[in-house]
Amino acid sequence: MKKLIFAFVTMLLVPLAHAASEFQEGVEYTVVSEVPSSKPEVTEFFSYVCPHCYSFEPLMDKLAERLPDAEINKVPVAFLGRDMGPVLQRAYGAAVLLKVEDKITPVMFDRIHRQKKMPASIDDVKDVFVANGVDAKDFDGVVNSFALNGMIAKYDKLTDKFKIRGTPTVIVRGKYELNMGEIGSEDRFYRVVEYLLSAD
């Protein structure tokens, strides 16, 4: 009887062992920090000018729906877009402060990548905000504010901390960086993130 129980328990453990080894350090992900964050969080480093980020946006939206208890963060980098890189980074932060990021981000991506209308100045960015319901005075009050300058400093600090050189880059719990080229499919992307959210 004990042998039967042992065999049954072993059968249960085999799938668990397989699941634990399905994703491997150095393949689907890389450890970039010794200590993970205490909360379930996923951070995407991105740029409005990055075509891969534009294509990746629907996956991040679905990830947020799939993981309602996880904190999904976006960090705009300044090193893409030449002179407009820091301006578009500031545009994202302004959208967050004005609580219109969910409206502005799709519009900005669409304008740059589908309509091929790259903003050439902060005034162009302001026009996008105003055209999408933001009062011009509200935009002016935020775009050079102390609060936004603080956010920009935080974005740059995180970009430096994780040595971000390309986008999109996804960091899970401040410890694991996804190796996007090794993941291979949308479904595996979600499963790797879920696996890392519960990893040690």
Image: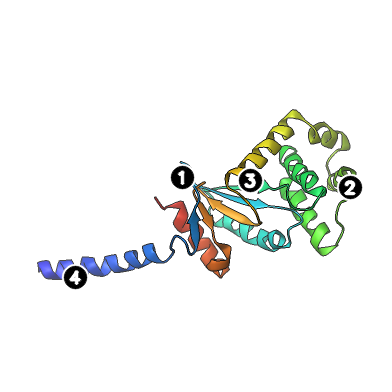
Q: Please tell me which of labels 4 and 2 falls first in the chain.
A: 4
Answer with left or right where residue 156 lies relative to residue 174: right
Please indicate, yes or no, whether residue 116 appears anywhere in the rendered image: yes
| Marks 1 & 4, CB-CB < 8 Å contact | no
Q: Which numbered mark, 3 or 4, is in the foreground of this view?
A: 3
Residue 36 circle label: 1
Task: Say whether residue 148 is left or right of residue 23.
Answer: right
Residue located at (76% from left, 42% from top):
90
The N terminus: image quadrant? bottom left
Q: Amino acid at mark 3?
A: Thr
Specify the label residue 159 is tagged with: 3
* 16 vs 102: above or below: below
Q: Tell me the tag on residue 7.
A: 4
Q: What percent of the width, then of the height, locates residue 40? A: 49, 47
The answer to which image quadrant residue 137 occupies is: top right
State the mark number for residue 187.
none
Nearer mark to the viewer, of 2 and 3: 3
Q: Secondary structure at mark 1?
A: loop
Q: Report the Cα–Cα distance between label 1 and label 4.
A: 36 Å
Residue 160, image x and y in percent? Answer: 62, 44
**Which of the two marks, 1 or 4, is nearer to us in this view?**
1
Residue at mark 2: 124
The first of marks 2 and 1 along the sequence is 1
Q: Where in the figure is residue 114, as x and y percent of width and height? A: 81, 64
Where does residue 60 sit, x and y in percent of width and height? 62, 57
Q: Would you say the residues marked 1 and 3 are in contact, meaning their CB atoms lie under 8 Å apart?
A: no
Q: Earlier in the sequence, mark 1 or mark 4?
A: 4
User: Which residue type carries mark 2?
Assistant: Asp
Along the viewing direction, whichever of 116 and 31 lies nearer the viewer: 31
Q: Residue at x 48, y 57 (%)?
A: 194
Kindly report the distance in space between the C-alpha atoms of the residues bearing marks 3 and 4.
Answer: 50 Å
Q: Are marks 2 and 1 in contact (CB under 8 Å)?
A: no
